[in-house]
Amino acid sequence: MTKQTVDRSLFDEVMVPNYAPGNMIPVRGEGSRVWDQDGREFVDLAGGIAVTALGHAHPGMVSALVDQANKLWHVSNVLTNEPALNLARTLCDLTFAERVFFANSGAEANEAAFKLARRYAWDHFGAEKNEIVSFRNSFHGRTLFTVSVGGQPKYLEGFRPAPGGIHHAEFNDLASAEALVSDKTCAIVVEPIQGEGGVIPARREFLEGLKALCHKHNALLIFDEVQCGVGRTGYLYAYQLYGLTPDILTTAKSLGGGFPIAAMLTTANLAASLSAGTHGTTYGGNPLACAVAQKVIDTLRRPNILKGVKARSDRLRAGMTDIGQRYRVFSEVRGEGLLLGAVLTESWQGRAKDFVAAGMEAGVMVLLAGPDVVRLAPSLIIPESDIDEALTRFEAAVKKLCG
């Protein structure tokens, strides 16, 4: 039987066109390097959009997956399983959490968080307390509920009517939030670092103000750490960087290092409102996913790993800042740890895609965060030599782009 060709054109023949992937098809990864069908090598500063926290094909993760695959794949939540319980206990030990709900994606974790906030308010204050305050340019997922809470109207085009009771304030503007929060508010949801919105860190006083608003109005504070959590800031979770504890935290992406898993973390008191039958998932807490995530967390909890994030961040930030200054393409490099955004200067506004494409051509994978920001979210253990090589290749891309 003749082997059928698999290339980019096949995507247009068999896939729903909601994505527009590049022509390169990766077939193998190791550490922070990726190879395509033709054997061409790329340095990965994209990390699968802040997912591959330990790089590609990490031996410990592979071992954990293979070991669990030979034991138990799936039982559903009619029963529980050892990897899920062990991972939940680990997350509770390392965070403020007392209870964990596992899901498959960040959107599902956020969906659970929003449902918990409304259910808790319904239980304790009545049905009128159901409003959620979020922030413009935020991103919380692609389900109808989460995309409605997210502050980017373009993602709702053609999908209305949207769920009601949702309001959007300006990020890092406490007065804007204060004008929207009332005794009808059940929750304020915020990304400590806006990822898709441009890699914008929240100011500490802003988050402290949101916490005070929640206390004043008996509302819950939800931190969406889907992108900025699991070591990406140099702390296991960004709330620890800020020294401010939320009521609910959502986590995904790096949690599984590439294997789909997500979680909602909260307290025992709040979790009681999601009693048996109020919410559920078929695959959430899957033994394979939990075994891999356990290895990710066990690896990242080592002090030298999290300390290394800062050193790598400084090296990458300095290199990108230098390129930006010499070619006058970036006005600043912002973010925390290994979630960085290089902001395009006025003359380059709207052309982030060009930098992504040029980088790919030069053998380095980067991301965008909106039209004006080049985003970097590499492995948290990327070798310094790979950072240097990536910067060399990216500089060549920028030089060519600048003509």
Image (cartoon, helix red, strand yellow):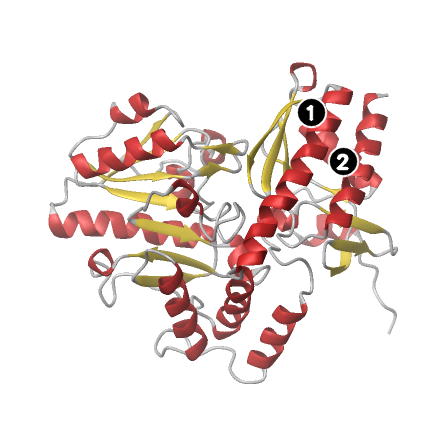
Q: Position of residue 33 (x, y in %)?
A: 76, 54
Identify which residue, 269 or 162, lies in the foreground: 269
Question: Looking at this rendering, what residue extends furthest in the left direction?
Answer: 125
Q: Position of residue 210 (x, y in %)?
A: 29, 34
Locate residue 385 relative to residue 334 in the image: left or right: right
Locate residue 75 relative to residue 1 in the image: left or right: left
Q: Mark 1 or 2 closer to N-term?
A: 1
The structure residue drawn at horizontal position 36% and vertical position 43%, both measured from the top left corner, is 243
Compared to residue 402, the image places residue 341 above or below, namely below
| Tag 1 and tag 2, C-beta contact below 8 Å | no
Q: If the image is split into quadrants, where does the N terminus sit?
A: bottom right
Residue 377 shows up from this direction: no
Q: Quadrant of residue 98?
A: bottom left
Q: Position of residue 357 (x, y in %)?
A: 76, 35
Compared to residue 174, the image places residue 59 above or below, namely below
Q: If the image is split into quadrants, where does the C terminus sit?
A: top right
Mark 2 — residue? 357
Compared to residue 276, the image places residue 157 above or below, namely above
The structure residue drawn at horizontal position 32% and vertical position 46%, both measured from the top left corner, is 245
Q: What numbered label is drawn on residue 90?
A: none
Question: Looking at this rendering, what residue extends furthest in the bottom direction?
Answer: 71
Mark 1 — residue? 351
Please name the amino acid that badge 2 sits on.
Ala
Compared to residue 218, the image places residue 25 above or below, namely below
Number of on-image labels: 2
Give the Cα separation between the discs numbered 1 and 2: 10 Å
The structure residue drawn at horizontal position 54% and vertical position 31%, both measured from the top left corner, is 198
Secondary structure at numbered mark 1: loop
Please name the amino acid that badge 1 sits on.
Arg
Secondary structure at numbered mark 2: helix
